[in-house]
Every structure is written in C-alpha cells, then in structure tokens.
Amino acid sequence: MTSPQNRPPVIERFYAHLDEQIAAGLTPEQKAGVENAILASTLASRHQIDIRRSFPFFSKRFYLVFLFGRDLRRQHRQESTLSRILLTFLLLIAVLFVTCCVLLTLYMIKSALGIDVFQNFHVGIWDWWLNQKNH
C-alpha cells in the first residue's frame, strides 16, 4: 500500500468517493489489493503526462483529458477497415496538397527569376499574381 502522500490522483479520487466507514474497515492488505487493482485496470499511474481538467462553458461543464506515455497494453486494438481507408484517403489528400504547394512555389520562384523552361508557353499564374499585386 502506498502512503497517502504518494498516492496517484486516481487512488485519491477512489477514496474520496468511498464511504469513510468502509475505508476505515479495510485492512492494509485489502487496501493494497484494491489500489493495485485500480492501478492495473486504469493504467493511470503509468502516464508520463496526465492532465484532467473540467471547466464551465455556457452553463454546462465540459472536461479536457490529455494523456501521454508509452503504450503498455499487451494486445493492440484492431483498426477497422473503414478507419484504414479514411486514414489512407486523408494521407493521400495531404500528400497531394503538399506536392501542389511545393510545385506552385517552385513555379513562382522560376517565374520571378525569369526562367523559361518552354519557349512561348506560360501557365499564367505569375501574370495573375502580378495583376493582383498591382490592384
């Protein structure tokens, strides 16, 4: 059993909700067993960062939880096929967006330097940009 000063917040919350007479009737072995069971089931003591806050917002209370730490579970959760498809789609969109931004930036640099890759062929983005700049 951990000392009351060194107990994790989840254990403190447990004892705050437990009836005082029941808590007083527990033996040290029982308290240690209950605390170990709570810690094993919640993994609360194993997070390097454990931030739990609640705040009022338009006459209701909301909560924010931020946990960070190594994944210590024995079995990893199975991802659904839909989540994999969505993740792939979002990744594809992000890669396409970044690629287009890089190509546009390179084109603008090329145009600003006056480099013609193909004679008498211009996409027109540089001219449009200059017209927008002048207005």
Image (cartoon, helix red, strand yellow):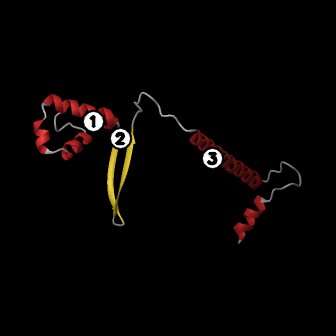
Q: Which residue is mark 2?
A: 49
* 29 relative to 123 in the view: left or right: left
Instruction: Identify the image quadrant of residue 59.
Output: bottom left
Of the numbered discs 3 and 1, the one sitting upstream in the chain is: 1
**Between marks 2 and 1, how big is the CA–CA gap?**
18 Å
Residue type highlighted by circle 3: Ala
Of marks 3 and 1, the one in the foreground: 1
**Between marks 3 and 1, how big is the CA–CA gap?**
41 Å
Q: Which residue is mark 3?
A: 94
Asked which secondary structure carries label 2, the reply is strand
Front residue of 28/4: it is: 28
Question: As drawn, which residue projects farthest toward the right?
Answer: 120
Residue type highlighted by circle 1: Ile
Residue type highlighted by circle 2: Ile
Q: Which residue is mark 1?
A: 38
Label 1: few (<14), some (14–19) or many (≥20) C-alpha neighbours in 10 Å: some
Asked which secondary structure carries label 3, the reply is helix
